[in-house]
Image: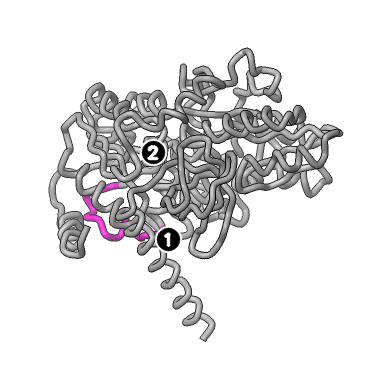
Amino acid sequence: MNRNDLEQVRTFLHEYDGPEIRLMEVCGTHTASIAKNGIPALLSPAIHLISGPGCPVCVTVTDYIDRLVSLSRTPGTAVVSFGDLLRVRGSRLSLADARADGADVRMVYAPMQMLDFAAREPDRTFVFAAVGFETTAPVYALTLEEAARRELRNVKLLTSLKTMPEVIRAVVRAGTPDGRGRIDGFLAPGHVCAVTGSNEYQELAEETGLPFVVSGFTGPQLLASIAALVKLQGRGTCLNFYPEVVTGTGNAEAKALCRKYYEPCDASWRGLGSIPRSGLRLREEYRTLDAGSSGLDGDHAARGCECAKVLTGQIMPVECPLFGRICTPQYPNGACMVSQEGSCYNWYISGRTR
Amino acid sequence: MCVAYPGTVLAVKDRTALIDFSGTRVEALTGLVRTKPGDRVLVHAGCVLQVLPPEEADEMQSLFDEIASLSEEDMKETAG
């Protein structure tokens, strides 16, 4: 994209005066990038961006966090996690609280780091807090593959793995044509599509009659994708605006590895409840590597917390009565304010009001 | 959480690659794609997710460099 193209896109988005359009980015990394690039301020007031249920930390139910806390306090067990999840509260405590209280909780940047812990401390069981979408699911599978190769038997996963298509269908079903939850088009998740391929989003587009654009993560890539969605409104089609990374069929090795280790399952989402076949769990033959992931469906949000409505686009973060008052990034009440990919966190740090 | 960064493969050994991210060197698993030294790749959670075509990798790289240099300027201004 040259500078002229970019200027044209900016002008188009700034001066758009057509019907009000509500576009959802379903990927938390898109949400964070939209905030960092100041994109809402570049758009016409008729174009609304809504963050969807694509931040894995935000959609994780409290039962799952409670189970992690319990495991971290079990003698001989350590919980290993990405940093974002540590501060999310379960029904009472977060992993960070548990660690401050003496529990064994270790933060890493990559799941394979857990394998070095496991090799150094063979008498301790290491449980990875395996949250994420289709992008991260193959990374956990590869970690298990590598653990088997290194003959490490003290490694397990507590899975809360989710997949996009069914939750997108649920969001579309939840919106009424003139209601606040209505969505007119989707920025499809670029790195999820790197694994799954963009073809399944073409199917979703045809089924829902809504446009999807697979987007990259830079400011210019996002602006171009948003402009494409505005132009495509009312058309059930999918464009791939991230072709350097995404193909129609995706990453065959990653998909094969996922099929080997996982099977689809019903999954519980904060704010949306249980959605059939919207998750992945370890297959029966690998169930000994599971640290008790099934049945973690209960969700007990903090009193007054409206994360559920924020995640489905029913309200804007600033409309939650806790937002900015008693719920801030420093003292978060809900998961959407904890995660750096959370809708509330990003609205708060960028001073966004619409 | 689906964040991924572009880097350059310096060396490949067994199932891992040594990747350079603008001077920072990190090991990543290579089980999801075949890669070789010199490839520009996208890395997610310690794992190579995709090999990038060189021209686009350059474009992404220059954007990342520009953002990095802007933050440095901002910090100098704040400190000054």
Q: Is residue A285 above or below residue A87?
A: above
The part of the chain drawn in magenta is: A36-48
Q: Which residue corresponds to mark 1?
A: A351
> In the displayed image of the protein, which residue is found farthest to the top?
A284
For the N terminus of chain A, the image quarter is bottom left
For the residue marked with disc 1, what is the amino acid? Gly
> In the displayed image of the protein, which residue is found farthest to the left?
A18
Q: How many numbered badges does the structure rendering display?
A: 2
Q: Which residue corresponds to mark 2?
A: A26
Labels 1 and 2 share a subunit: yes
| Residues at discs 1 and 2 in contact (Cβ within 8 Å) | no
Q: Is residue A202 above or below residue A244?
A: above
Residue B62 as seen in the image, left or right of residue A147: left
- The mark closer to the camera, 1 or 2, is 2
Tell me which corner region of the image, top left, top right, bottom left or bottom right, holds residue A325. Answer: bottom right
- Is residue A320 in the magenta section? no
| Position in image of residue B54 (x %, y %) | 33, 53
Q: Identify the secondary structure beneath mark 1.
A: loop
Residue A292 as seen in the image, left or right of residue A232: right
> In the displayed image of the protein, which residue is found farthest to the bottom?
B80
Q: Residue at x 31, y 32 (%)?
A: A198
For the residue marked with disc 2, what is the amino acid? Val
Q: Identify the secondary structure beneath mark 2.
A: loop
Q: Residue at x 36, y 62 (%)?
A: B63
